[in-house]
Image (tube, coloured by chain):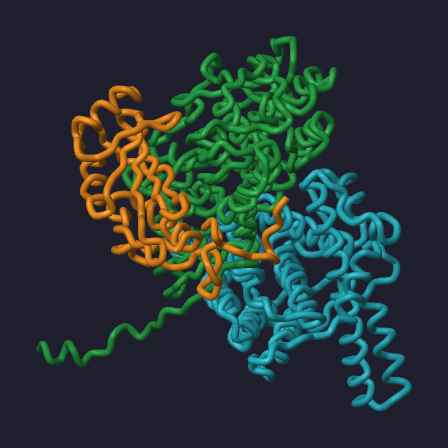
Amino acid sequence: MENLNTELPKEMTEEFVVNIGPQHPSTHGVLRLQATLDGETIKDLLPHLGYIHRGIEKMCESLGYKQFIYLTSRMDYLSAHINNQACSLAIEKGLQVEVPARAKAIRILMAELQRLTSHELWWGSCAMDLGAVTPFFLAFRDRERILEIFEENTGNRLTMNYITPGGVMTDINSDFVTRLKTLLVKIKEHLKEYETLITGNIIFQRRLKGVGVLPKELAISLGCTGPTARASGLSCDVRKYYPYDGYEKLDFKEIVADGCDSWSRYVVRMEEMRQSIHIIEQIIDNIPEGEYRAKLKGIVKLPVGEYYQRVETARGELGVYIVSDGGNKPYRLKLRAPNFSNLGALKPITVGSKIGDLMASMATIDLVIPDIDR
Amino acid sequence: MTKEELKTYLEQTFPQNKVEETFDFPLLYADKSELFIIAKKLKESPETLFDFLFCETAVDRTPNLEMVYHLNSTTHRHDMVLKVVLEDRENPEIHSVNELWKAAELYENEIYDMFGIRFTGHPNLRRIMLGDEWPGFPLRKDYKDDINIVTL
Amino acid sequence: MTLTIQFSDITKWIHETLNASMSPGWALFSEFVLAGVAMILLVVVLAVLFVYMERKVAGFMQLRLGPHRVGPWGTMQVFADVFKLLLKESFAPFTVDKFLFNFAPILVLAVAFMAMAPISFAPGLQLWDMNIGILYVTAVSSIGVIGILMAGWSSNNKYSLLGAMRSGAQIVSYELSAGLSLVAVIAMCGSLSISDIIASQADGWWIFKGHLPIMFAFVVYVIAGTAETNRAPFDLAEAESELTAGYHTEFSGMQFGMFYLTEYINMAVISMVATTVFLGGWLPFHIYGFDAFNNVMNFIPSWIWFFGKTFFIIFLMMWFRWTFPRLRIDQLLKLEWKYLLPLSIINVVIVAFLVVMGWHF
């Protein structure tokens, strides 16, 4: 019998390799996933990075402390404000500068608005990855309004470079508060629309529930952060555990779900949008008067040492690790990008599932490729 | 544990190792040969439980290379830095921590790509961003590239 | 009927004129040519209308205007697109199977045209009233999948192959429940001929007088029809976000245009069959007892009734497309084999019982 078994041919199927990316509609950037498929089932997945590697860390080593911040807007371009904030906080930490209260409030407002825009875009593109095109346009409706506010107050729409060491670049406009308030009312209405259009849709739920399961232990081991990890039951909101810029005074909930699947990640992000609105509503009426920026020297020099600052971007924990040798440029700057760690989760959660599930997992992890490559 | 407590704890637990502190975290220097043992102990001993490797990187302290591990505990919510100095600049090699923290797989690929540090025991060591043909290791201080790097 | 000149009068006049001026064989030949040209024109005009409609409907659902730059209200946009496709090079990659690659778009388009043959657009306006009209439509429209498989295989592209295999699995399975839901009506009216089916609905459309089973069959037919035309939420064969463009990834120029056109013609066929079988074809909407209302309804020409109903079903399909996310391949097959097919079979059994007991109108 044993002889017979060895003689029998194996399954008459053959695995084949498909390169998903670098140009592919649902990688949202230039990520290349080398997928080994058996029919529709994914057997192996190997990410190839570097298609948009710009060497930001190397470039930062040749730029002054006030200058390199502009490069970080180009990493996770959907969290540009928050990236700037992280670097500013790290430099302020080294310089021991106290940021004016007004600047802190403006920073939080901008950061939370940025989180809203990012999640809106994610919502649209997530639905689009699952084949529904309409949500993308609905999401851009609100995002556009927020970007207009950004444009009026900071001069830019995507890479704002607004938050600088010591505070913010310019003061907010006089009609900022009123415009934001009317906008928030609309966004809250529209959030309900989003829920009726997509969240309750049976196909949408079936596509996400039980798909891309990332157990808590694996999420910890892989260093996942942000909504991706919080959907796996790992409480890791930097705003709660290592508060910065006055988040400790605000009342907001950390959204943690324990479903571990794509659906939980979806729910967490939808809830986070509400929490962001809640945070904005607390500050909007009492932005302190005063200076919007602490005066810094023309050329900033950090004392010798190492500084690590983390913030919560829309996708997770962004760490800025500055090694200073006392000069006017950082000796080494490491940007711990949230997407880079979250990318590690893609293989373990998709192997064994269908191609359609890969898109669902990728959409709910919400990868931004320039942040991975830097 | 707070920063001070953790520092004292590290001093007591690893008396033969140098313990310092950075601006934010306590800092433990480990020897290259015993890195994996110390890391395993830090991860598994119930007082520390450093189960979350949130940042792994290298710094080129000419002439040495320095591996920097930022560790966090999701139970105790404390952080520390683990450092290993690599003196062999030509052929730096260190044991991978991928078995302890899976996050290290991508981080170490990136470090290999940018600093040329080889990791023994790494499941798939490759130049993840620049490609196999790229000459040199860009994040080293002696890397010269007159075309692509613009200095101000 | 309120029309003083009926379509049958026109066709009869053409027939007589042709026969008077040439031999019967040539007359028949020229009638074929005329009918073919008329059919192609009709289909192309319909497809252009559908494309324009789809864009406007999509725009309406997505808070935008849709095309509005080319011509008044953007009506010329579709023509501009068609001309662009006509002028583009039909590029074939080096490694494709040349014959199959060039033949596939022609095959799918030809099949889509063939399926239009027995459809009755208005009284007397029917190309071929064969006695197995419905069977013919279902049989012919399932050949289209061979063209899709051909396209996917010959492209020598893994995405195309995956798309083609998906399409094959999908169309083969959804043909079953589409066929079974048509069988429900056929069992009630007792004929496969399209003119008979329409005639049997003079006293009420089948969807109204066929009790719940026919309503169920209608819903199943619309779902299965959407799946058969490879449209969202069943557009797995194209699945833009998964397979870039599925089976027609490698096609360009008018070859791509043919696939695009085919999608709309297939939509037209599916909705015309649904109109004919369930919604009374070109018959007006009547409510028993309201004579004034019925007379007003009679006043509306029959072709407006027919195309009105067709466009309504097409609007339904567009509504699906711009609202629903896509299913996954295993969910798609599960929906068919575990839910739609068993329910359709039970439905057919119920219909058969009703017919045997004579409980239908």
Compared across the picture, whether C230 is left or right of A239 comes to right
Q: Residue furthest front?
A: B63
Q: Determine whether C206 is above or below B25 in the image.
A: below
Q: Determine whether A102 is above or below A128 in the image.
A: above
Which residue is pictured at 44% across the width and 31% down the height? A268
Which image quadrant for residue B13? top left
Chain represented in green: A
Chain represented in orange: B
Which residue is pictured at 38% across the width and 54% down the height? B112
Residue A215 x, y percent position in the rendering: 30, 40
Q: Nearer the viewer, residue C169 or A329?
A: A329
Which image quadrant for residue C91? bottom right
Residue A91 x, y percent position in the rendering: 52, 27
Q: Colour of chain C?
A: cyan
Q: Is residue A262 among the parts visible in the rendering?
A: yes
Which residue is pictured at 67% across the width and 72% down the height? C255
Residue A40 x, y percent position in the rendering: 41, 61
Which residue is pictured at 64% across the width and 49% down the height? C318
Q: Residue furthest left?
A: A1
Q: Nearer the viewer, residue C246 or C317?
A: C246
Q: Quadrant of the N terminus of chain C?
A: bottom right
Compared across the picture, whether A106 is left or right of C159 comes to right
